[in-house]
Image (cartoon, rainbow, N blue to C red):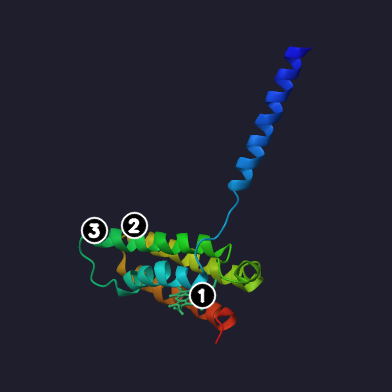
Amino acid sequence: MKKFMIIAVSYFSLLCLSVSFAQTDEYHPLLSVKEIMNGLITPATTTIWGAYQLETDAQWQEVRNAALAVIAAGNLLQFGGAGEGEAATAVKAGWKTYNQQMIEAAKLVILAADNKDEEALSVAGNDALYPPCESCHQQYQAR
Ligand code: HEC
């Protein structure tokens, strides 16, 4: 009986421990939307939109990595940002749609980079990647 108690107690403390771990694992945004725009989106899109007459593998790799950064930013934007009210905005249908469009556009950039296809890169950059920036800003950027 005593042995059973000890086992039961140690199971219980293990359970408590895993609950407190689960709590510290919760997602907390560290960056505001503005910081995500300036720190991730702007440098990445500068690389993508500025890509022209690419020659080396390294240049294409740079474009591909920039597209990965856009996807990472989009992944963060799914939860909004650390700024006030930004988590609430992120559940809005428009926000989700434009963010998803930006992520899909970045995937087209990756495809173009994998095929080293500058025509496809330019179409992906101008026709797919740019419009969701504009739409989201029109609706959600405070003026
Ligand atoms: C899902 C919505 C959303 C998408 C998509 C989006 N943005 Fe933004 N962006 C915002 C919001 C909201 C702000 C305003 C943030 C603030 O001022 O707090 C902003 C602000 C900015 C700013 C101004 C930052 C500043 O210092 O004021 C830049 C630059 C920017 N975005 C670039 C882009 C580019 C380029 C894209 C497309 C590749 C893009 N954004 C896509 C929501 C979005």
> Disc 2 versus disc 1: distance between alpha carbons?
23 Å
Sequence-first disc among 2 and 1:
2
| Res 111 quadrant in image | bottom left
Residue type marked 2: Asp
Residue that protrudes farthest toward the right in the picture? 1
Front one among 87 and 102: 87
Residue 114 is tagged as: 2
Residue type marked 3: Ala
Question: Would residue 106 be found to the left or right of residue 114 on screen?
Answer: right
The C terminus lies in which quarter of the figure?
bottom right
> Disc 3 versus disc 1: distance between alpha carbons?
28 Å
Tell me where residue 67 appears, x and y as whole percent: 39, 63
Residue 108 is tagged as: none
Front one among 90 and 29: 29
Residue holding disc 1: 132
At 45% from the left and 72% from the top, the residue drawn is 37
Residue holding disc 3: 58
**Would you place residue 26 above or below residue 48 in this image?**
above
Report if the beta carbon of the residue with label 1 is closer than 8 angstroms to ligand 1.
yes
Residue type marked 1: Pro
Label 1 SS = helix
Question: Would residue 126 be found to the left or right of residue 115 on screen?
Answer: right
Tell me where residue 104 appears, x and y as whole percent: 49, 64
